């Protein structure tokens, strides 16, 4: 039910951040309209590995159980591979949860509607949908210009893949591929790749990049895989340089603030956390207790305080693991040193 006299909020973008914020606001009786360019359910390029503080945000927003009911799988172990070095399985410093985005986004969209939120699918927000009363949750911003490495992501689901750990990370000179068990007995195969000269934006043949080089541990792992072709998707032009929420002219949540390098498996967590951070200031604005500019300032300040340290570590980690000459020694170090594994995990969360 709507709070009497509450001012309405429009969220542009119905991914994880937008839907979670919408749910949080509806729990306080704020009238919310959400405009989503696409339709549910849909596949998204994502490792589908939810790790870090976002799990607590989900629990506080009453959503954790919903994910469990939708078949979320717990991930407790990880293993790392370079072309010639293996490390693990090792226990993860804290468990993660794995769920297909096809399921996750749909479950959140349904919950938002059940709580009385108005969800408009196939509706693209335009530049005039900004300013007081509008929140931007439109996801990653495209990389501007052709300077620096060009990154693209690919993902596909498969059956008949037996993993050595709940999450396997396979590093190669061109990028990395993560494999994890998800709901429905499938394995998600998701990679981030450096674009080669002359390659199209989606990296040519997605299968070829996701299967790994001949003779690699990845190709061996996927030898008997039965791929779900309908789940194959790609995303290009990823901007991985960290940005501050305070530098944004609008109230933003999730990747619309900044995208953390995907190798951390923390982007979804940041979407949930930033949405939770925004609920209280936006509810106060809706009730007429605070000005929009004040809500904007508080949300940006709290997001930057929550994310600055992990963004800095993530940038450093991504540079290290994607430097071809360092991949073998890093996997060897991960095999020997629990301290190193814990440092890389904890500092990016
Ligand atoms: C290769 C790769 C692997 C990843 N692996 C992981 C992982 O394992 N774990 C993890 O935590 N994170 C991972 N991430 C990051 C994670 O996917 C994102 O951080 C997360 O999806 C951000 O959620 P969001 O809601 O901000 O954006 P999105 O989920 O991208 O949602 C944005 C929504 O806005 C909509 N939209 C866009 N423009 C408009 C518009 N103008 N009007 C209306 N709607 C619009 C889009 O259709 C979309 O539904 C990965 C990312 C990549 C690229």
Image (tube, rainbow, N blue to C red):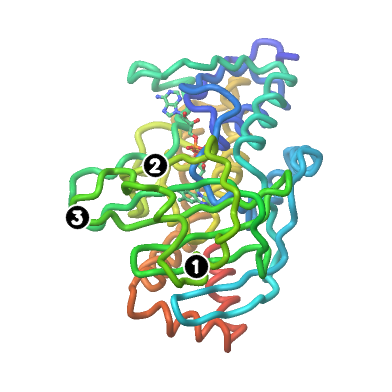
Give the structural element (helix, strand or loop) at label 3.
loop
Nearest-to-viewer mark from 2 and 3: 3
Q: Earlier in the sequence, mark 1 or mark 2?
A: 1
The residue located at (75%, 14%) in the rendering is: 1
- Tag 1 and tag 2, C-beta contact below 8 Å: no
Q: Earlier in the sequence, mark 3 or mark 1?
A: 1
Q: Is residue 318 above or below residue 246?
A: below
Q: Nearer the viewer, residue 265 or 207?
A: 207
Q: Which disc number belongs to residue 80?
A: none
Left or right, 121 with reference to 312: right
Mark 1 or 2: in front is 1
Q: Which of these two is toward me, 224 or 175?
A: 224
* Residue position marked by numbered label 3 in the rendering: 197
Q: Which residue is drawn at the image coordinates 53% and 72% (left, top)?
A: 344
Q: Position of residue 329 (x, y in %)?
A: 43, 85
In the picture, measured across the screen, residue 79 lies left or right of residue 146, that is right
**Residue 347: x and y, percent?**
54, 69
Q: Which residue is mark 2?
A: 235
Residue at position x 26%, y 44% in the image: 200
Left or right? Give the position of 328 relative to 167.
Answer: left
Residue furthest to the top in view is 5
How many other residues sit within 10 Å of disc 2, few (<14), some (14-19) or many (≥20)? some
- With respect to residue 21, does 225 lie above or below? below
Helix, strand or loop at label 2? It is: strand
Q: Quadrant of residue 272?
A: top right
On whether ligand 1 comes within 8 Å of the CB at mark 2, the answer is yes
């Amino acid at each position: 039910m709507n709070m009497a006299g509450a001012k309405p909020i429009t969220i542009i973008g119905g991914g994880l951040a937008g839907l979670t914020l919408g749910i949080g606001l509806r729990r306080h009786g704020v009238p919310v309209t959400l405009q989503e360019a696409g339709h549910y359910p849909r596949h998204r390029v994502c490792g589908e590995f939810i790790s870090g503080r976002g799990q607590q945000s989900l629990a506080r927003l009453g959503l954790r159980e919903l994910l469990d009911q939708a078949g979320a799988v717990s991930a407790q172990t990880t293993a790392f591979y370079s072309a010639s070095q293996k490390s693990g399985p090792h226990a993860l410093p804290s468990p993660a949860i794995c769920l297909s985005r096809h399921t996750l986004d749909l479950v959140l969209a349904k919950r938002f509607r059940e709580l009385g939120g108005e969800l408009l699918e196939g509706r693209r927000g335009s530049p005039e949908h900004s300013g007081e009363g509008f929140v931007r949750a439109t996801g990653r911003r495209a990389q501007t210009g052709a300077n620096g490495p060009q990154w693209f992501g690919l993902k596909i689901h498969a059956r008949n893949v037996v993993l050595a750990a709940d999450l396997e990370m396979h590093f190669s000179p061109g990028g990395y591929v993560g494999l994890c068990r998800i709901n429905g007995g499938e394995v998600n195969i998701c990679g981030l790749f450096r674009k080669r000269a002359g390659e199209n934006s989606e990296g040519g043949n997605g299968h070829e990049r996701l299967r790994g080089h001949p003779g690699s541990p990845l190709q061996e792992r996927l030898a008997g895989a039965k791929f779900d072709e309908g789940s194959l998707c790609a995303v290009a032009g990823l901007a991985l340089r960290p940005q501050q929420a305070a530098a944004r002219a609008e109230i933003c949540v999730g990747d619309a603030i900044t995208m953390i390098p995907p190798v951390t498996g923390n982007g979804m967590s940041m979407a949930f956390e930033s949405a939770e951070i925004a609920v209280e200031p936006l509810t106060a604005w809706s009730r007429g207790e605070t000005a929009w500019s004040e809500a904007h300032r508080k949300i940006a300040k709290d997001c930057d305080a929550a994310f600055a340290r992990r963004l800095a570590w993530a940038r450093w980690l991504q540079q290290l693991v994607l430097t071809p000459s360092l991949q073998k020694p890093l996997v060897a170090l991960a095999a020997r040193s629990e301290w190193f594994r814990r440092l890389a995990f904890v500092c990016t969360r």
